[in-house]
Amino acid sequence: MTRFAGALAALCLAAAATTAVVAAGPATAAPACSVGYRVNQWQTGYTAEITVTNGATALSSWTLTWHYTGNQAVTSAWNATVRQSGTAVTAESLPYNAALPAGGSVSFGVQGTSGGTTPDPTDFALNGVSCGDPAPPVTTTPTTPATTTTAPPPAGCATATICDDFEQQTGGAPGGRWTVGAANCQGTGTVAVDTTVAHSGTRSVQVAGQGGYCNHAFFGTSLTGAGPFFGRFWVRHTTPLPAGHVTFLAMRDSTDGRDLRAGGQNRALQWNRESDDATLPAQSPAGVAQSVPLPTGTWSCFEFELDGAAGHLRTWLGSAEVPGLVADGVPTADVDQQWLARAWHPSVTDLRLGWESYGADADTLWFDDVAVGATRIGC
Ligand code: CA
């Protein structure tokens, strides 16, 4: 997962307009660290990607400090916890990128306001050890106007293992951490980056899902372990959830080799366990009434908690918990009788978003701002 986070950070800043490299100390001495600082600035703000390369001593966690000499004020960060006091800035590692082996590198980023002045900092220190007397910064001539901005990091999920707003996608099928595919058979369903519809920025992923199982289409990424996982994504779709059974989120459970599915049935949201076809809630009228439809033509925030060790599942739509979509181990009439019929401790290996119909139901959906973390991320 660290690999994904690093790759994402690198992609975020691929369009950085200027580059400064602060070299380590004398060439004859083993450097304690070196820092690459890539900034993209506009009239009132900036983003910077900072890549720290460690020296010869492995670190179990890291703190990078520096001072700004301009008017920079950090307002947000990704892949690190960043604090600023006056001109002094402190960036601390997060649990998923804390370990920094000898010679290893880690990247994180900041966004801030600048009042137009963003001289590159030069006094970086890693865990209190100076990265050396800096050579004069090498600053390339900006190749884009100062008003050009890169996409800011995805809002609100910088500490999550997965935090993706798709703004780094260049078109066609989503790439990077995402793989497009469909199990068993492939039909006419399609998955593509859409630059005309977005919850954040200018990009989302569109799934044109068709009726019939083999016309299913998903894009997915790996997950590891029993969690607890807190997932959050924004979804927009076209056709109301049908009476028939459909899926827009699937996670492969390695304990039984089948999917844990979220989607709909009887026009309301439901979870379905492929291995025994248990549904949550039960599909009685009283059960369905404890779930909710998925609104069409607008972005909805779907959140879930999956705790494999406890065998618990919770679900929120628009930040409101959906009572029919809760499996907390305590039997609830019309909700979880099927679900609790067998011991269930899922260990999921991936997260896939898309469309799968077990009847003839088609829908066009968009997904954006997908995040998975160890704590609830929120909308
Ligand atoms: Ca987006």
Image (cartoon, rainbow, N blue to C red):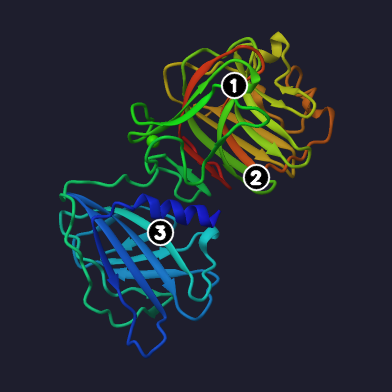
- Depth check, front residue: 161 or 95: 161
Q: CA distance from mark 1 to mark 3?
A: 40 Å
Q: State the SS at label 3.
A: strand
Q: Residue furthest right?
A: 342
Q: Residue tagged by mark 1? A: 215
* Disc on res. 161: none
Tell me if 132 is positioned left or right of 357 in this view.
left
- Depth check, front residue: 121 or 85: 121
| Residue type beneath disc 1 | Asn
Q: Please give the name of the residue rendered at 22% of the width and 51% of the height, measured from the top-left corner.
A: 45
| Residue type beneath disc 2 | Pro
Q: Residues within 10 Å of mark 2 (few under 14, many from 20)?
A: many
Foreground mark, 3 or 2? 3
Q: Please give the name of the residue rendered at 78% of the width and 29% of the height, measured from the top-left corner.
A: 275
Q: CA distance from mark 3 to mark 2?
A: 25 Å
Quarter occupied by residue 292 = top right
Q: State the image coordinates of residue 40 (x, y, percent, origin top left).
A: 25, 54
Q: How many marks?
A: 3
When the figure is inspected, residue 159 is found, relative to residue 282, above or below; the finding is: below
